[in-house]
Image (cartoon, helix red, strand yellow):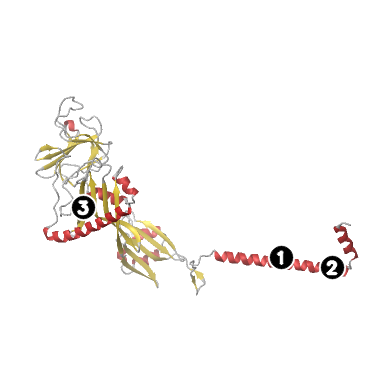
């Protein structure tokens, strides 16, 4: 007899009352087991769900009204003809609310807004302005805060910290690309080029193996970096020559860069009138002219560049000529002093401010590279005259700007010696860390 037939025969001979009781008990135990498992799973899910809630997440509830208070924020950049009233209207602030704000004490502080700056407005859940922040710059502004139905308006200025950063770069391809690889900000690299722009032509004088070290500042507000500050000291080694520039704040309030001895780094003239160019023809009094095919003195330097490249004044002065002139094509001539003058020829066009008797500052755009006059292609012909005589612009020794004042010399020397010592310490530590 098989097992299943044995069970069947047993059940048929078993009393029916007892059988019903046994089956009922088995069913009840099964139900209890299933329910207990469901409760455990629910508890597990609750526990799991509770674990996913961050401990620092808070929901603020107004205990009196038992309803949460929500805030929304809008920000706008100030444009031409914007006023506080027009900005608030753009943000859908009610007329009554606007009237309350402009009638508040010191509301005039919010009326002196400037193009390009920002205003942020925070609304409560009644769509009423609860806070206004007029952001002048990264550290100052004006705030208006709603307290007990009144707007309290005041100026503020955040405390700042300055942190010194040291960097050292050896040039392989270019000053700019190598600097970026070392984490030097774009603005700091541009400052470096400006500081040495009188001594080094960064388009033509840089060689692989040249190097530079510098200490500059980062400006922090509440521990967060807000902007890159000034270069405090820099050392540039170009073709074996060492150039050191130290920032010093003069008693007059402005800051300039000086050599360790107190000579002004700034010169009366920049080395190059065109960026992103190359010298296609140097100063040569026995050059064979490319168009006339005969020996004709080349009394300047030619900078080949794309048509439309800006041409800048290498020094402060006054425009004495700005028109077409024979083989020069479109020509600008600037008189810098009784001794010095410069010429910029073959221009495609003039800048709108380049007019006769116009005062020009060093670095201002005079016009744009072209090929007017006797030119085989787009380039700038640049001449430098000393005492009305042609001089090689690449070899002339430029006069310096004013050195440190004698009354400030001792203080400057002390200031410079501290920064030089700091730079040397950084350089020594950097050299040891690379070994």
Image-quadrant location for residue 348: top left
Q: Earlier in the sequence, mark 1 or mark 3?
A: 1
Pointer 1 local density, CA inside 10 Å: few below 14, some 14–19, many at least 20: few
Q: Of 317 and 64, which appears nearest the observer?
A: 317
Report whether residue 240 is seen: yes
Tell me, yes or no, whether the two marked residues, 1 and 3, touch with CB atoms within 8 Å: no
Report helix, strand or loop for mark 3: strand
Please tell me whether residue 347 is drawn above or below residue 197 in the rendered image.
Answer: above
Pointer 2 local density, CA inside 10 Å: few below 14, some 14–19, many at least 20: few
What residue would you read off at disc 1?
34
Horizontal side of residue 92 vs 45, given as left or right: left
x and y, in percent, of residue 113 in the image: 31, 59
Please tell me whether residue 326 is drawn above or below residue 70 in the rendered image.
Answer: above
> The N terminus appears in which quarter of the rendering?
bottom right
Q: Earlier in the sequence, mark 3 or mark 2?
A: 2
Residue 20 got which mark? 2
Residue 245 got which mark? 3
Report helix, strand or loop for mark 1: helix
Residue found 73% across the figure and 68% down from its top = 32
x and y, in percent, of residue 170 in the image: 29, 47
The alpha-carbon separation of the residues under discs 3 and 2 comes to 105 Å
Q: Of 429 and 59, which appears nearest the observer?
A: 429
């Amino acid at each position: 007899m098989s097992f299943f037939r044995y069970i069947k025969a047993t059940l048929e001979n078993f009393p029916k009352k007892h059988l019903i009781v046994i089956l009922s008990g088995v069913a009840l135990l099964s139900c209890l087991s299933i329910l207990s498992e469901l409760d455990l799973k629910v508890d597990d899910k609750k526990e799991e769900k509770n674990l996913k809630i961050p401990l620092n997440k808070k929901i603020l509830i107004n205990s009196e009204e038992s309803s949460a208070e929500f805030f929304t924020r809008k920000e706008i950049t100030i444009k031409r003809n914007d006023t506080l009233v027009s900005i608030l209207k753009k943000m859908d602030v009610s007329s009554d609310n606007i009237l309350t704000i402009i009638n508040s004490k010191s509301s005039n502080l919010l009326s002196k807004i400037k193009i390009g700056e920002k205003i942020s407005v925070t609304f409560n859940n009644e769509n009423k302005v609860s806070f206004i922040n007029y952001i002048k710059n990264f550290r100052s502004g004006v705030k208006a805060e709603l307290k007990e139905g009144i707007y309290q308006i005041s100026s503020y200025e955040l405390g700042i910290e300055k942190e010194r950063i040291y960097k050292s770069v050896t040039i392989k391809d270019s000053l700019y690309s190598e600097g970026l690889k070392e984490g030097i900000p774009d603005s700091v690299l541009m400052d470096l080029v400006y500081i040495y722009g009188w001594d080094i032509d960064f388009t033509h004088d840089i060689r692989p193996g040249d190097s530079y070290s510098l200490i500059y500042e980062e400006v922090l507000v509440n521990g967060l970096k807000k902007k890159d500050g000034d270069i405090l000291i820099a050392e540039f080694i170009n073709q074996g020559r060492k150039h050191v520039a130290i920032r010093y704040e003069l008693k007059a309030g402005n800051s300039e860069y000086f050599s360790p001895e107190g000579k002004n780094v700034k010169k009366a003239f920049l080395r190059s009138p065109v960026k992103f160019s190359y010298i296609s023809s140097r100063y040569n009094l026995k050059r064979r002219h490319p168009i006339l095919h005969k020996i004709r003195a080349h009394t300047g330097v030619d900078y080949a560049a794309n048509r439309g490249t800006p041409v800048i004044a290498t020094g402060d002065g006054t425009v004495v000529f700005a028109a077409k002139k024979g083989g020069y094509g479109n020509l600008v001539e600037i008189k810098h002093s009784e001794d010095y003058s410069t010429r910029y020829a073959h221009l495609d066009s003039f800048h709108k401010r380049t007019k006769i008797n116009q005062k020009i500052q060093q670095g201002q755009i005079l016009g744009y590279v072209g090929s007017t006059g006797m030119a085989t292609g787009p380039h700038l012909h640049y001449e430098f005259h000393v005492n009305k005589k042609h001089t090689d612009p690449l070899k002339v020794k430029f006069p310096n700007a004013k050195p440190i004042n004698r009354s400030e010399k001792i203080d400057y020397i002390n200031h410079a010696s501290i920064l030089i010592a700091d730079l040397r310490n950084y350089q020594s530590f950097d050299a040891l860390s690379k070994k």
